[in-house]
Amino acid sequence: MSALALTRSCRKRMFKMPDFRQVFLGLVMALALLIVGLILYPILLTLVSTFVRDGALTGAPFEEAVAARGFSTILYNTLIYTTGSLCLSCAIGIFLAWANERTDARMDSLAGILPILPLMVPPIGSALGYVMLFANNSGIGNITLRYVFGIETGGPVSILNFYGLIAVSSLSLAPVVYLIVSAALRNMDPALDEAARVFGASPRKTLWKVTLPVVGPAIASAALLVGIHAVSSFTFPFIIGTGAGITTLSVHIYRLFAIFPPDPDSAVAVSLALLLLVYLGLFFQLRVARAVGRAVVGGKSSSTATVKLGPWRYVVRALFIVYLGAVILPVVGLAIGSLQPYLGAGPSQFSLDNFRTVLGNFETRDALINSFSLGALAATINMAVAGILMFASMRMLKKSGHLIEYSLMVPAVIPHIVLAVALIIAFSGPPFYLYGTKLLVLIAYCVMFIPEASRAASSAISQASEELSEAAHVAGAGLFRTLRKVVLPQVVNGLLAGWVIVFFLAVNEVTASSFLGGLNSAVVGHVAIDYFANGRLSEVAAMTLIVTVVTATVVLAASGIIGRAYASRR
C-alpha cells in the first residue's frame, strides 16, 4: 500500500498544473524577449545587409550618400530648421509656463488646456491647415487679407519658407517645453522669488536672476528633447518644406525610397547619420536631466509666489489669446480647405464634394478604416503588453525589473523614419514577405508606441495600493484572482488613458506610415502624403479633418469617463 501511495503521489506531482505565478512570469519573459527582438532584429539586420559585403565591413554606402549632390545643403537645412524650431518653441513654452505658474495673468478657464491644445491637432493637420490659409497666392487667408487691405501683389503672408516652417513646427513642439518647465516651476520653492522681491528686485530681475537659473536644468532638458524631435521630424518639412524647396534629412530619406529604382543603401546610410544625431542629443539630454531635481530647492512651501504684473497682465493675456488663435487657425484652414474644389476657390464654390469623394473612394475609405482599426488594435495590444510587463517589473521582479523597463523605452530614441527603413529591409524579403501588409504597419505601431504605453501603465500601477494586493494574498487569493479583482479595478482608468494616447498617436502617425503603407494596407498617413505629392490638397484636408474630429471625440469621451470615475471615488 505504501508503494502504491508513493506511486500515486509522484504521478500527481508529475502531472500537476504549473502555478499561475510561474506561467505569468514565463509570459512576461516571452513578451520582453519579443519586444527586444522586434527592435534589435530589424536594426541589426539592416546594418549588416548594408555595411557588410562579401564578409567584410565597408563604408561605401555612407561615402556615396555623403558625396551625393546637394547633401551638404540638406545638412545645412536640417541644422537651420532644428535650431530655429528649438529656439522658438522654447521661447513659447517657457513664456507660457512662467505666465501660468508664476504670474497673476493666469487665465483659470484656459490655463490647464491652452498650452497643450496643439497636441489635439495632428501634425499633418497643423501643417496642411496653415498651407491652406497662407499659401503665397492661393491661400484663403492671403486672399482675404489682400481683399481687406487692398493689396494687389502676392502674399502678404508667406508660409512656404524657413520662417513659416519653423513657426508652424514650433507651435506643435512648444507643449513639450511647457509641460517640463511648468512642472519644474511648480516644484520650485516660491520663497526664493519672495525673498528676491523683499530685497527690492523687480519682477524682471527676479525672473532672470532667480527663477530661470533655478529651473535652468529643466529648460536645458526640454530644449534637447525638442531638438531630438525636430531633427527627425518629417511631416512639417515635407508638407511646408516641399513648396519652399527645403529638404531635410528625413525628407531626403523618404525620397531615396520614392525614386525609381529605390536606393536603400543610401537611405540606410543617411538614416544612420540621423540616428547618430539623435543619440548625440539624447546623450546630452540625459546628462542634463539628472540635474532637473535641483529645481526643488528649499523644501516645501504652502503658498505660491505670484508675480504682480500690473497693467502688463493684460498684455500677457492678449498674448495668450494670440497663441490660442495660432493654434485654432490650422483647424479653420482645414475646414475651409476641405470645402474648396481647389486651393484658392472662393466661398461661392464651397461644397461637401471632397467629403463625398473621401468617403466614397475605396482607397481613402479603406485608409480611414485601416487607420482607426489598426490604431485601436495597436493601443489594445500595447496597453495589455505594457500592463503585464510593468506590473511584473514593479511588483514581482523588483531587482531585475528595471531591465524590462529599459527595453520598453528603447524605441523612444529611434526616429520613426529610421525604424520604418529597418522594418522594410528586415521584413520585406524571405521568409516574411510582409511589405505592403497591415501586419507590418501594426508591428511598426506597436514597436513605436510601446514607450508611451509603458509610461502610462507605470503611472497607473504606481498609484495602485500594494496593501490591498497583500491583503488579498493573505486572504488566500491567488495571483490571477488578485490581478482581476484587486489590481485591475485600480489601474483601469490609467490604462484607458494610455490606450487613448497610443490610439491618437497611431491614427495620426505619418512618418512610418508613408513608408509602410501600400495598396492593401493603405492608412491615412500613407494616402495623405501620396495625395499631397500629387496636388490633391482639398481631399487631404477633408480626410485629415475627419481624423481630427474622430480622434478628438475619442479623447474627450475617454476624458469624461476617467473624470467621472475619479469623481465617484471621492
Image: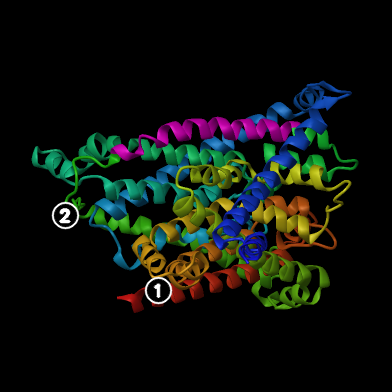
Residue range highlighted in magenta = 269-294
Q: Is residue 570 above or below residue 226?
A: below
**Could you tell me residue 279's position as x and y percent?**
57, 33
Of residue 427 and residue 135, the one placed in the foreground of this image is: 427
Quadrant of the rendered structure where residue 569 is? bottom left
Is label 1 in a helix, a strand or a loop? helix
Mark 1 belongs to which amino acid? Gly
Residue 144 shown left or right of residue 315 in the figure: right
558 or 553: which is nearer to us? 558
Q: Disc 1 or 2, which lies upstream in sequence?
A: 2
Quarter assignment of residue 199: top left
Residue plotted at (50% across, 64% down): 479
Q: Is residue 442 left or right of residue 95?
A: right
Work out whether residue 440 can be spotted.
Answer: yes
Q: Are marks 1 and 2 in contact (CB under 8 Å)?
A: no
Quadrant assignment for the C terminus: bottom left
Camera-side residue: 310 or 259?
259
Identify the residue shown where x is 78% and y is 61%: 438
Disc assigned to residue 563: 1
